[in-house]
């Protein structure tokens, strides 16, 4: 399966877009494959993603220059990678083992089936929780397709703190997880903007478990415990 970019440079901004599509393999945005929209896109195959290889990832571009540069940097900076160990530029060792690549390729080939499975889990969560006023389920927009790798929820009650809720779920062996922190607060960046949406998600967001082997009974159990706690 090939993913390509068809994003046009904006004449207004000349900005280049790097898509962090790490968990999003199989998702569509306005019908386009996520990861293939920006100038380059990145997909992760970390163990928590929809297609897993332990670690590793995929770099996507249809810009030949970026492609060549990425290959050069990922192979210890060697222009001739076949016959010599001479490094032309400062590079890195980001090569993937063949055995890992084989494991991942087999899953990427059946991504539609994997997405279907995650969406089935999401549908069950949605059916059970959509009318619960203490929770807001983060649903895809019309015309888009989420892979629902991490079913995402915002807590909308003051009765329990999000961190306490996630900790209490763990006592029932339910692995929920706090939403990602707001990156612009990291110490190496200058937090120049208020980022109200990211701030809200950081404070009140959490992900519900969606492992491929969960069945409807498991999802119902998670929902029952969640409703008991909020
Ligand atoms: C998982 C994830 C990453 C990190 O991916 P790695 O392969 O672990 O580097 C980055 N961004 C998002 C949004 C993710 O979900």
Image (cartoon, rainbow, N blue to C red):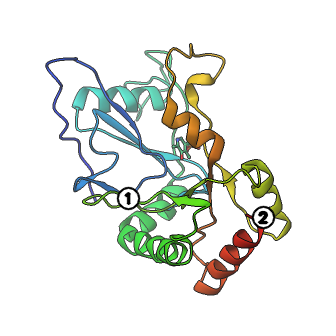
Q: Give the number of callouts.
A: 2
The residue at 27%/20% (across/down) is 15
Quadrant location of the N terminus in the rendered image = bottom left
- Along the horizontal axis of the image, is 44 left or right of 178? left
Relative to residue 100, is residue 22 depicted above or below? above
Report the side of 25 relative to 127 (left or right).
left
- On screen, residue 200 versus residue 26, left or right, reads right
Q: Is residue 150 visible?
A: no
**Tag 1 and tag 2, C-beta contact below 8 Å:** no
Say left or right for 173 vs 132: right
The local secondary structure at tag 1 comes to loop
- What x and y, as percent, mark residue 22? 47, 46
Q: What residue sits right under mark 1 in the picture?
A: 140
Question: Which quarter is ligand 1 in?
Answer: top right
Q: Is residue 68 above or below residue 219?
A: above
- Of label 1 and label 2, which has the lower sequence position? 1
The answer to whether residue 58 shows anywhere in this view is yes
Nearest the viewer among 107 and 213 is 213
C-alpha span from label 1 to label 2: 25 Å
Dividing the image into 4 quarters, which one contains the C terminus?
bottom right
Residue 169 shows which numbered tag?
A: 2
């Amino acid at each position: 399966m090939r993913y390509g970019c068809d994003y046009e440079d904006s004449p207004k901004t000349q900005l280049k877009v790097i898509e962090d599509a790490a968990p999003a393999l199989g998702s569509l945005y306005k019908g386009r494959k996520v990861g293939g929209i920006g100038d380059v896109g990145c997909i992760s195959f970390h163990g928590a993603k929809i297609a897993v290889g332990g670690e590793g990832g995929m770099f996507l571009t249809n810009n030949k220059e970026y492609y060549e540069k990425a290959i050069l940097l990922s192979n210890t900076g060697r222009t001739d990678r076949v016959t010599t160990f001479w490094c032309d530029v400062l590079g890195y060792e980001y090569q993937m083992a063949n055995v890992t690549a084989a494991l991942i390729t087999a899953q990427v080939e059946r991504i539609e089936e994997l997405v279907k499975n995650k969406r089935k889990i999401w549908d069950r969560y949605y059916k059970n929780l959509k009318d619960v006023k203490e929770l807001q389920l983060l649903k895809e927009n019309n015309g888009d397709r989420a892979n629902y790798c991490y079913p995402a929820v915002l807590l909308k009650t003051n009765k329990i703190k999000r961190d306490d809720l996630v900790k209490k779920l763990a006592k029932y062996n339910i692995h929920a997880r706090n939403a990602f922190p707001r990156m612009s607060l990291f110490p190496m960046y200058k937090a120049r903007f208020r980022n109200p949406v990211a701030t809200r998600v950081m404070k009140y967001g959490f992900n519900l478990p969606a492992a491929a082997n969960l069945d409807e009974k498991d999802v119902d159990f998670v929902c029952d415990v969640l409703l008991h706690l909020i």
